[in-house]
Image: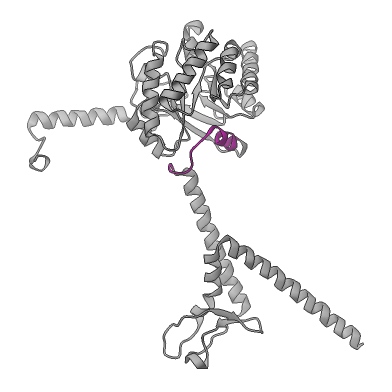
Amino acid sequence: MVYRTNFVVYRANLAVYRANFVVYRANLAVYRASPGVYRKVHTAAARFRVSAGGKAGGGNAGQHADGTYANRNTGPASGQKSFSLPKSVFCELFHVHLRRKTEKTKFMSVAITSDSTSRKVTTHRLMEMKQRGEKISMLTAYDYSMAKIIDRAGMDVILVGDSASNVMAGNVTTLPITLDQMIYHGKSVVKAVKRALVVVDLPFGTYQGNSKEALSSAIRVMKETHADCIKMEGGAEIRESIERVLCAGIPIMGHLGLTPQSINKFGTYAVRARGEVEANKLIDDAHLLEELGCFGIVLEKIPAMLTKQVSEALTIPTVSIGAGRYADGQVLVMHDMLGINQEFSPRFLRRYADLGTVITKAVQAYIEDVKNGDFPNEKEQY
C-alpha cells in the first residue's frame, strides 16, 4: 500500500517535472525570439508590489515554492511589503505581452512588405510572389522625377516601355523610337529607383530576325542603363534571339497577345486570341518562353479566361494589361492611369487621378498671377 502511494506521488512529481520542462522550453524559445519581451514579462510582478512608503521600487520578480511570483528585493530588509502574484495572473501577463509583441511584429512585417525602402525586387522575388499568391504591381516610367515618386510609393516593377514613343515623343505608334532613346529613358529611371525591378523594352528593329543584333542591343541596354532586365515582344518567331540573349545571362520578360510593335501586321488594336487557332498559338508560345528561360510574360489585350488558363499553367508570373484579373500582376501606362493622357480611354483603363485637369488649372492660375503682377510677391523675392 505504501509502495503504491509512493509510486502515485512519484508519477505526480514526474508529471509536474515534465510540465515544468515544457514551460522551460517555451520560456527559452520566447527568450531566444525576443529577450526584451521575456525580461519584461518576468519583471511584471514587480510592478504589482505595494510599497510601505508609497513608492515604487526596483527589483526582479521571483517564483515562490507555492507557484506565486513576487519581487525578490521586497520584504523586511528592503522596508517594502511583498505582494505575491498568482501563477495564473503571471501567465496572463505573459500572454498579454506575447500577444502585443506578435501584433507589433505583424504590423512591422506589413510595413516592410509595402515599404519602398525594403529589399530590392528581383526576378527571383517575382517568382516567390507568384508562389505565395501575392499580386505584382507594375507601372511605366520614363524620367527621373516620376520614377522616383513611383518607386517610393512601393511599386514592384517599373517598365521603361517603348510606349515612350507615344506619350513622350508624340508618335502614333511605338515603332519610331530608337535604341538610343530607350537607353536615355532607361538611364533616367534607373538613377531614381531604389527598390523596384526595372525592365527596359527592346524597341522595334533591334532584335527581330537577327539574334546577333538582339544580343548587341540587349548588352547595350544592360551596360548603359544599369537596368535589371529587358522585355521582348513575340513567341516562336523570335526564339533564336531569346536564346542568344539568355545565354549571355540577361533576364528577359516576354510579351504575348496584342504586341504593339506588330500593329501594322494586325491592322487594329482589337482584342487578340479570341479564335481557337490564335489562342492555341499563344498558349504554345507561353510554354515556349517559360522553357527557354524567360522569368515572366506580359499578356496584352486577350480574353480574361485565356489569361487564367495561361497563368495557371505556367510557373513563371504573368502580368496583364487589358488581359483581365486572373494574371499574377497588372501593368498600366503611367500617363493613362494618372489622367495626363486623356485621349486614350480603353475599357481596361482605370484612371486613379485627373492630373490633366489639375495641371491645366495650376498652369492657368500661374498665367493669371503673372499677368496681374501677383507673382512674385514681396515674400517670393530676394
- Number of labels in the image equals 0
Occupied quadrant, residue 227: top left
**Can residue 298 be seen?**
no
Q: Is residue 164 above or below residue 66?
A: above
Q: Quarter of the image containing the N terminus?
A: bottom right
Image: magenta residue range:
116-130
Q: How is the image coloured?
A: one colour
The residue at 63%/66% (across/down) is 28
Q: Nearer the viewer, residue 8 or 351?
A: 8
**Can residue 282 be seen?**
yes
Q: Is residue 252 magenta?
A: no
**Could you tell me residue 151's position as x and y percent?**
41, 36
Q: Nearer the viewer, residue 164 or 367?
A: 164
Q: Is residue 42 above or below residue 241?
A: below
Q: Quarter of the image containing the C terminus?
A: top left
Q: Residue furthest right?
A: 1
The residue at 11%/30% (across/down) is 370
**Could you tell me residue 75's position as x and y percent?**
52, 90
Image-based side of 100 in relation to 18, left or right? left
Q: Nearer the viewer, residue 242 or 340?
A: 242
Occupied quadrant, residue 8: bottom right
Q: Residue furthest bottom?
A: 76
The residue at 51%/8% (across/down) is 266
**Could you tell me residue 198's position as x and y percent?**
46, 29
The residue at 16%/31% (across/down) is 366
**Could you tell me residue 169's position as x and y percent?**
33, 16
